[in-house]
Structures are given as structure tokens and as C-alpha cells.
Image (cartoon, rainbow, N blue to C red):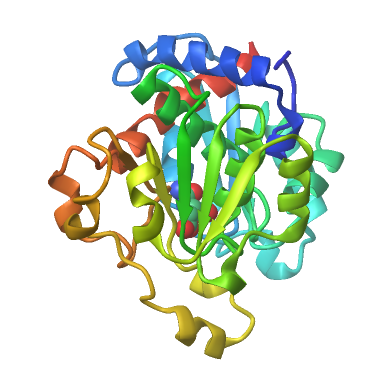
Amino acid sequence: MWRNRDVISARDFTRAELEELFETAKYMEKYARSRLDVMRGKIMAVAFFEPSTRTRLSFEAAMKRLGGDVVGFWGTEGTSVEKGETLADTIRMLDVYSNIIVIRHKYEGAAKLAAEVAESPVVNGGDGAFNHPTQAMLDVYTIWREFGYVDGLNIGLLGDLRHARTVNSLLEALANFNVRVYLISPEFLRPRAETIDYVQSRGLKLSFHTNVEEVIGELDVMYVVRIQKERFIDPLEYEKVKGSYRVAPEMLRNAKKGLIVLHPLPRVDEIDPRVDTTPHAKYFKQAALGVPLRMALIYLILS
Ligand code: NCD
């Protein structure tokens, strides 16, 4: 099901495929701090045109834990992109130097274009405000690992739901499960209409809220994203919402005992650091699971 696939959008993956990925990732957890030599002789190319810490490093760590090698660049300094090389030509080169390509780019659709040009599988590590499918897989995997199941959970998404590509992809991945999603954001930061339409057509139950306090008691998962400052077209709009939400221990007093708080990271000021030491905080664990999840992904695609 996974062999040689591109990973461009979370929409392309069925529930059965996600479950196969999760089972494989669980197996990979045993090797995520050591080594499982199944990718020896294989090379992963990483082309990160946009900043990244976790996505790039966890992909690289995953390939190395599997015994494979990594080549690539982050930022375009020192590459021929500075001389005016097109994305398509850069990808053609990575394609002949490697077996799998992971790309991050500020333009929506860049990963799809790369997949059309490359023969090797292409994995989207984030394209503009659009998609971040492997983050969504990691997010649902973390929920599945924490609860042992996904169906039946009440999941709140809090923050800049319009510009956060992780939210877009997470909603699409959640459409495979029988969950209820609470979209909590200022009105003009609601997810894009095409995503809402798509997930509703798949039967995902959604409700819209502007105030966390109103729904906090009902949630099993609270997924927080930062305001995506760099994606605002109008800086005045950004000023209006800057600092408009913050998860703090006081807010969590009314939460279910088992509520887990997730965040794709980086956080800026939307989660008070005092939350880190509460049993609700699972965002660092979530980031750690990025290695076994991406080991599983590489393994399923390349083996
Ligand atoms: C996110 C991203 O790059 O979209 N980070 C990540 O990949 N873990 C989230 C963000 O930048 O806010």
C-alpha cells in the first residue's frame, strides 16, 4: 500500500494505511534510539527551502537510525538556486542522487510539482500554508499511542487554524476517524473553506468556537498552534490577533483529568511554560515520536 508512494497530502491516505503506519511506528520505537539496519545503501535527499528544526532533524535521524544516508541542504545559500536554478531542475538533480526526497517550501504546491518531476518518491515536509501530511500522521499517531484508540475522542484545535498547514493536514487525517472536532479560533482564523467542505463531506463532526473556556471541559485532546506570523498578508491583521490566546495552568483546572495538550512546535507564547510540568503536556513526547513515525514511513515507502 505504501511502496514507492509520494506523500503530498493527508487526503491520499486511507484509515487502513494510517493504521499500518502506526503499527510499524510502534515497532520502530524499539529502535528509535539505536539502529535497525534496513536502509543500508539508500540515500534520502532533504531540500528545505524554509526553516525547520523538528521535521528535518527527525527525518534525518530516522534515515540514519535505519542505516541509510542523508544528503541535502537547508536554506538556499550555497546552492545553485542562488544562481537562478528552477525548483524543477534542483529536484531533477536530487532525484538522481538519492532514493527518496523530502522537501519543504514556502509555496503551496511545491511538493506536488517536485513529485511530478522526480521518479523517486517525494515527501512533503510542508508547503506554504497548505499541507504538512507527515506532521498530521505524527499527530494522530501520538493520540493513538496515548489513548490506544482514536474513535470517540473530542479533539479541540486552538489557534491560527487558517494559516497553519499542520491543521489543514490534521483535519484531513482525522476525517478517517469517528471523532468530534472543536475548532477554536478568532473568526477570521478559521480553517480554509475547501478543507472544511472536504472533511464535512467525509462525515467529520465539526463545531466552531471563539472561546476555549466554553469547551475545555469536553476535550480529550487540545491541539495548539502558534499564530503563523510569516503567512499573514496584512500585518495589521496579525497585530489584531497577536497574543489573543494562551494556554495556562489556570485554564486547565476545568479540563478532564486525562486531557492531553499537543503542539507541532515551535511554540512562541501560546502555551505557558508552566504547563510543561503538568501531566497534560504531551508536546515534547509528540516531537520525540517523530523519529519512529518517520522511520516507519521511510521503511514502508522504500522497502
Ligand atoms: C510546523 C510547521 O512548520 O508547519 N512545525 C513543524 O513542522 N513541527 C508548525 C509551525 O511552524 O507552527
Location of residue 129 (image quadrant): bottom right
Using the image as rendered, state which of residue 257 and residue 121 is in the foreground. Answer: 257
In the image, residue 223 above or below residue 25: below
Residue 292 in view = yes
In the image, residue 269 above or below residue 141: below
Is 144 positioned to the left or the right of 74 in the image?
Answer: left
Residue 231 in view = no
Using the image as rendered, state which of residue 111 and residue 159 is in the foreground. Answer: 159
Quadrant of the image for the C terminus? top right
Is 117 positioned to the left or the right of 229 in the image?
Answer: right
* Residue 299 on image: x %, y %: 57, 16
* Residue 223 on image: x %, y %: 42, 47
In the image, residue 239 above or below residue 265: below
Location of residue 45 (image quadrant): top right
Q: Residue at x 29, y 21 (%)?
A: 33
Q: Residue at x 62, y 15 (%)?
A: 300
Single out the residue that lies furthest toward the bottom: 236
* Residue 55 on image: x %, y %: 47, 43
